[in-house]
Amino acid sequence: MPGSPSMNGVAERRNRTLKEMLRSMISHSILPESLWGEALKTATYILNRVPTKATTKTPYELWTGKKPSLKHFHVWDCPAEAKPYRPHEKKLEPKTVSSYFIGYSERSRGYKFYNPEDKNIFETGTAIFFEDVEFGGKNKVSDIVFEEELISIPKPIHMDVSFETNEEPQQGIISSSPFQTEQIVQNEQTQLPLEQVQKEDVPLRRSTRERRYAIPSDYVVYLQEHVSSMDTMNDVLVFIPEHEEENGVMEDDPINFHQAMKSSNAQKWIVAMNEDYKSMQDNKVWELVPLSEGCKPLGCKWIFKTKRDSRGNVERYKARLVVKVYTQKEGIDYKETFSPVSSKDSFRIIMALVAHFNLELHQMDVKTAFLNGDIDETIYMVQPENFVIGDPKQMVCKLTKSIYGLKQASRQWYHKFHQVILSFGFKMNDVDDCVYHKFSGSNFFFLVLYVDDILLATNDIGMLHETKRFLSKYFEMKDLGEASFVLGIEILRERSQGILRLSQRNYVDKVLKRFGMEDCRPGDTPVSKGDKFSLDQFPKPNLEIQEMKKIPYASVVGSLMYAQVCTRPDIAYIVGMLGRYLSNPGMAHWVAAKRVMRYLKRTMDYMLTHRKSDHLEVVGYSDFAGCKDTSRSTSGYLGKVLSKI
């Protein structure tokens, strides 16, 4: 259908891969951008000769029936001394031309070269490539100093399960700037089963700079799995963006099972994996069946996460088995994926009611919540790589419940919880689908669901315990007692004075560190008096455009927005204004965003305070024609009781 690229997801995903490769090649090149077409051809040439996870054969082999050779591959944009064909060449003329490699010939087995002197492109099969020199592009590859270090490999840890060794390679990330990192993938010549590993000293090359871990790309995994048979393999340098999550990712969390077993907390990760596997067995998430002919099971992997409290102390080590869902097909493996969550407005209103009526406020957590959802589709999954029974190629897991990673898992869990809680006499709120209420005479009860976190607010302690017992009957629950920390928000109560405070101090501190503003000069206000923002402030000079591409403007605004919608309405105006220019921000917008962070540096101890009042009321205010472009009002309301700072 014209104008519907989403209907051909496979082609669109490959187009995205090509564009990402093209941008990387151009951005690290000193060649003119007019050669983008040659770069795109080269990227296509490479992708046609490497396999994907969907098939073990390359597109070239599927088309021609011949295995491709990678021996003639060279680094795009590398300097070269090429000998062009010149029939009238003089004897004393130089035989070669200093040029740059830009691709492979479509008409012969030769190469394409670009001559910067006459700006011409020529083809030849005779050339000397200089691929070991430092890139001369816009982003230099930093020097990395290695030192020999002896490390001790511990004896294997035995479990009552069978282990496999097809783990993803370990990757180290070396920070080169606040917003750009380099990734080093080291080759493992052999992979031994864990049972055969003995304690010995092995010399490894270790970087002297701080490492940071990230999820490996499919292409790097392919290199690790398919090129390890070579005598030597150079370190692969890949530029990747820093992973960003709302609640923060601890840098020392393992990215795969192999790395978890090498860590100092290996025994704790084993316990965490056993707990998650036991939960799946208790919930009867799958049944082991022979793989039907023509069916392709989904892959799975272990995800490891260190859970911490509001002060950063380790609470527990968590392991979770997730499905690799990039092979799920819409209409076959899933239909709908949308799942509601409670809004932050509902959360703040409940907090205001808790403070006003002095309600009991407790918190519960649903263990492995997504495993409770029922699925309607027939889905097969490979056995977990560390808990294999029988032949893993013949026996697979037929899912009977939803599992983490499935596109429809969150939706199926919500439907299950919705049916259960309605059967207990609760009613759904008309505005927020994840807020439920129950009234019995003068007693009332509010329940707020945010994925697997549940807040319980009531004036009847008996009804509170009854609801907890009911939920524990249907789901595996963890009673956290009185709520003190939820969704990254710290809850502080002074019940005798009818005061409830909400703080995001730790979140603000993390945001400042993430963007290198932890030592900035504190600011007095979030915005300067008289500042006006408009579309005329977008970057104009080419230098400013290139500079803005390196600035994480959207990430900063998104981080500020989460603080604003939760506990910091004092920055709502400026964050709303900055959010209008996410597609093409200028330097003035970036300066304003940094000013907001400097203001948060000074006011990170500010809390959203709810107090008991004689009566509840909301008084609203609005500016007049706050938007310079549309003459519309831009500010929202602040209730006198519902939100005070």
Image (cartoon, rainbow, N blue to C red):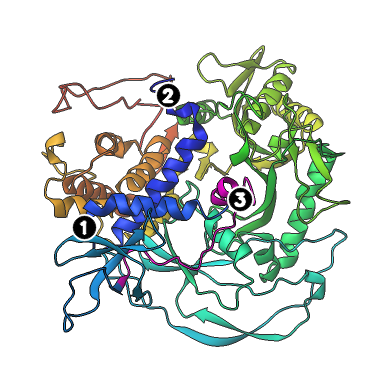
- Alpha carbon distance from label 3 to label 2: 34 Å
- Alpha carbon distance from label 1 to label 3: 37 Å
Give the residue type that dot 3 points to: Gly
Q: Residues within 10 Å of mark 3 (few under 14, many from 20)?
A: few
For disc 3, the marked residue is 65
Between 205 and 489, which is closer to the camera in this rendering? Answer: 205
Depicted 244 relative to depicted 101: above or below: above
The image position of residue 204, as x and y in percent, is: 59, 82
The magenta span reads: 52-79
Q: Which mark is residue 32?
A: 1
Of marks 1 and 3, which one's residue comes earlier in the chain?
Answer: 1
Give the residue type that dot 2 points to: Ser
In reply to whether residue 53 is colored magenta, the answer given is yes
Any part of residue 605 in sight: no
Between 131 and 614, which is closer to the camera in this rendering? Answer: 131
Circle 2: element type: loop
